[in-house]
Amino acid sequence: MRHPSWPHIVEFLKAFPSGSLVADIACGNGKYLGISKVLYMIGCDHSQNLVDICRERQYQGFVCDALAVPILSGSCDACISIAVIHHFATAEHRVAALQELVRLVRPDGKALIYVWTMEQEYNKKSKYLRENRTSQGMKEGISNDTSVQELLVKQLPIVGNQDSAHSVSSINDFQDRECNSRNVANSKLPIHTNRASFHSQDLLVPWHFKGNPDKDKRVEPFGPLGSRDPGPVFHRYYHVFCEGGLEAACQTLSNISIL
Amino acid sequence: MRLLTHNLLSSHVRGVGPRGFPLRLQATEVRINPVEFNPDFIVRMIPKVEWAALLEAADNLHLIEVPKEPIQGYEHNEEFLRKMHHVLLEVEVLEGTLQCPESGRVFPISRGIPNMLLSDEETET
């Protein structure tokens, strides 16, 4: 997605001490891999073309699936997942992707996750950051101008046995709590009108490709209105999170705290 | 792929779990890529390195001998730090393979990029 780096991500990365190991899961063209010279960042993506671009930029990258990341458990000081989780079409996959992020970081390690949110109002230009304190003392920051939901998650030290069955049984609860949840398999996915509000949580967003069709050149998904660009249009699936949707997904995971 | 990156990679073939580490490294093309020496960075990295995995990888690449473990007082030993800097950051495997020690599954490294994609049957759930 072509936009200036979200400032929180840069801040998050720069706060880590020299010699920190950070993984960028589904790193795309490596936008965040070069933010700091004193961090050791590795990126991975499903797309060979995008990892090629990371490589051209002298970054360390490899090709893999975000649901099965071949990084040693507990080896990273931090990981980031920017605009990734919302591409998974089922709650199970979204939770599985989150579980991978948590697995990768060491005890006391941190994960930063960004997803698209329903509260996307292009008319509003205000730049304040709104914080909601829930009864459990969690903080959730929603930035209105960037229309994303960010969540900072910390891996707690492992105490006793991890009950992985617990996570699986909670996924059903999580699905019920999702607002406007739909049975995607039986209904047609609406195609989002670029620059308009989201009317549905599960939808397809048109991406317009320009230039060399062989390279996975991501152009901003919000093509200019009334554009006469005859280039190919690719519809990408998004599950747009409702308020609290991301943290609800994280609550199915054990051994983490939401910062 | 640098050796520090190799040190973080583990096989995710279904069922192998922690026995999927470390991946067995073979290289047909290696390049030495000079990187600016930052002693503070290396000092902080040393405790994070899975040393046995590094020894095995360096051995498979027929590299200069890596000490069996961090030497005492390594924080102030520039010769040691420079050696580790070289091994961890300056050796790039461009072409080769990574093999899961448990399942035998081979992952290619091409143009410095490991391809770790699995088929659906192989994916660990």
Image (cartoon, coloured by chain):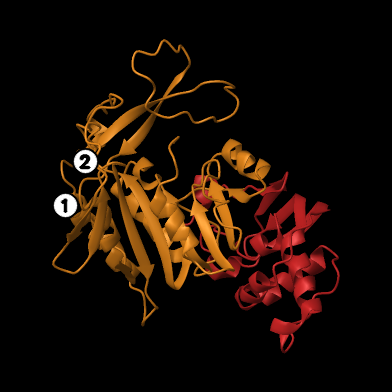
Chain colours: A orange, B red
Mark 1 — on which chain does it sit?
A: A
Identify the residue at image location x=72%, y=89%: B72
- Report how far apart the C-alphas of labels 1 and 2 lie in the structure: 17 Å
Q: Position of residue A101 (x, y in %)?
A: 43, 59
User: For the N terminus of chain A, which image quadrant?
Assistant: top left
- In front: A158, or B22? A158
Q: Position of residue B65 (x, y in %)?
A: 84, 74
- In front: B14, or A39? A39
Mark 1: give few (<14), some (14-19) or many (20+) Cα within 10 Å.
Answer: some
**Mark 2: amino acid:** Glu
Relative vertical location of residue B63 with respect to residue A132 in this rendering, above or below = below
- The residue identified by callout 2 is A119
- In front: B119, or B95? B95
- The quarter of the picture where residue B62 lies is bottom right
Identify the residue at image location x=30%, y=64%: A167
- In front: A101, or A182? A101
**Mark 1: amino acid:** Arg
Residue B125 visible? The answer is no
Relative vertical location of residue A67 with respect to residue A216 in this rendering, above or below = below
